[in-house]
Image (cartoon, rainbow, N blue to C red):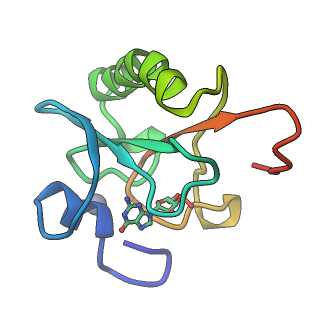
Amino acid sequence: MTPSSGHCIFCDLIRGAAEVSICYEDSVAIAFLDIQPVNPGHVLVVPREHYEVLQDIPKDVGAHLYQVAAKLIPRVQTASGATDMNIVVNSGAAAGQNVMHYHIHLIPRREGDGFDV
Ligand code: 5GP
Ligand code: ZN
């Protein structure tokens, strides 16, 4: 679902209806490369179930997503060559959420890369 439609691109990706570069998956969570990375190695950690925002997510699922994110950080660091990162959730359209299926951004950052996340 984008803010303006009833369709969810992440649900499509999760059920294999569109191409995606998967970094990790289990029965609850999936992580894949962002199609328009802020920096190379930009990963999204996503629940398989469609939840829009954090307050909709069962506690165990929310906790699991952060465990997956933490586990992926060393891989993202190695793959990107950047040790620092923004770990970001945009919650709601006014806050910059464009895909209304909850996701955690892992965005590798380097000194002076000039991005404003
Ligand atoms: P948001 O703006 O909702 O916080 O982040 C949505 C993210 O999903 C954006 O960084 C955008 O590039 C990414 N995205 C949107 N559509 C697709 C897609 O079809 N495939 C992948 N891999 N990422 C997508
Ligand atoms: Zn969805």
* Residue drawn 44% across the image and 74% down it: 2
Q: Quadrant of residue 113?
A: top right
Can you name the residue that lies furthest to the bottom here?
5
Q: Nearer the viewer, residue 24 or 102?
A: 24
| Residue 106 image point, x, y percent | 54, 36
Q: How many marks?
A: 0
* Residue drawn 32% across the image and 80% down it: 6
| Residue 84 image point, x, y percent | 69, 23
| Residue 111 image point, x, y percent | 85, 32
The vertical placement of 20 against 39, above or below, is: below
**The image quadrant in which ligand 2 is located:** bottom left
* Residue drawn 45% across the image and 54% down it: 34
The vertical placement of 13 against 26, above or below, is: below
Residue 4 as seen in the image, left or right of residue 92: left
* Residue drawn 60% across the image and 50% down it: 90
Q: Nearer the viewer, residue 67 or 106?
A: 106
Q: Quadrant of residue 1?
A: bottom left
| Residue 31 image point, x, y percent | 32, 40
The vertical placement of 23 against 114, above or below, is: above
Residue 91 as seen in the image, left or right of residue 19: right
Q: Nearer the viewer, residue 24 or 101?
A: 24
Q: Nearer the viewer, residue 48 or 54?
A: 48
Residue 97 as seen in the image, left or right of residue 111: left
